[in-house]
Amino acid sequence: MFNEVVVYGSGVLLLIGALFTLLAAVGVLRFPDLYTRMHAASKAGAVGGGLILLVVALMSQDASIAIRAIIGIVFLLLTTPVSAHLLAKASLGAGYKPWGETVADETVTIASNRPVAE
Amino acid sequence: MNAALFMEWATLIALVMLALALALSVVRIVLGPSLPDRVLALDLLTVVAMGFIGTIAIRTGFWLYVDIAIALALLGFLATVALARYIMLRRDTARDGEGP
């Protein structure tokens, strides 16, 4: 009985995770510039991949596999924001401008308020 | 509908959705006007491939695929970091697409 509940719950979680990943890909395809695409790729992508790994941990019924899958989730949640932030910082530094209709560019005010002395 | 049949259908639908996500990421890599767009789409591609491998592990019961998924996540992170360093270092050279 409990096993059945786990299997049905895992199936629903798997479908939700795959849907999040698909929406991340749709967002990366449809959004207008790099900095908006990054929202879809890093947030929805990480949640989708993490949910699928969580389903692997639930379905395996084995402690060693489950711990490995949970380590994968933690690793994904740690590295995805880091890589997205690094890519945004690198492309801003390289001079790729945001989309023309972006209303707030806080990097300009931060750069002008920064003390010059190093 | 019993549990095994439900899981078979759920993994099948999830595989179809993930394959569609892979195709859309590849479209963005081909279209992507600038280099950071392509790097971002490649990063998403590794995450989607990781989910695909995890779903195949659930469907077939070969749980060793989880290790491949974790290794792929590590590889994708390192590739994105290296390409971000590359974008940072080539700021003075000629750019493609919509760069200034």
Image (cartoon, coloured by chain):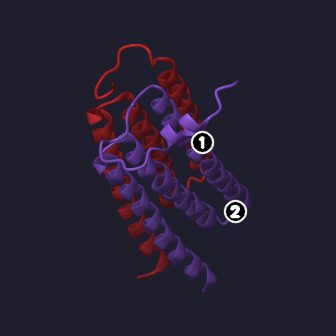
Chain colours: A purple, B red
Left or right of residue B39, residue A57 in this image: right
Point out residue B91 in the picture as x, y percentages from the top left corner: 45, 19
Q: Which residue is mark 2?
A: A62
Callout 1: chain: A
Q: Position of residue A5 (x, y in %)?
A: 56, 81
Instruction: Identify the image quadrant of residue B77.
Output: top right
Q: Residue at x 38, y 46 (%)?
A: A37
* Dot 1 amino acid type: Val
Q: Residue at x 54, y 25 (%)?
A: B85
Residue drawn at x 35%, y 58% as measured from the top left: B17
Side of B59 where B65 appears, left or right? right
Q: Chain of mark 2?
A: A
**Between marks 1 and 2, how big is the CA–CA gap?**
31 Å
For the point 52% across and 35% down, which residue is it?
A: A89
In the rendered structure, which amino acid carries the disc numbered 2? Asp
Residue in the foreground of this view, choosing between A17 and A89: A89
Give the mark nearest the N terminus, 1 or 2: 2
Q: Eyeballing the image, is B94 above or below B10? A: above
Q: Front-most of A113 and B69? A: A113
Are the two marked residues, 1 and 2, in contact with CB atoms closer than 8 angstroms?
no
Residue that mark 1 sits on: A82
Q: Residues within 10 Å of mark 2 (few under 14, many from 20)?
A: few
Q: Secondary structure at mark 2?
A: loop
Which numbered mark, 1 or 2, is in the foreground of this view? Answer: 1
- Which secondary structure, mark 1? helix
Q: Quadrant of residue B14?
A: bottom left
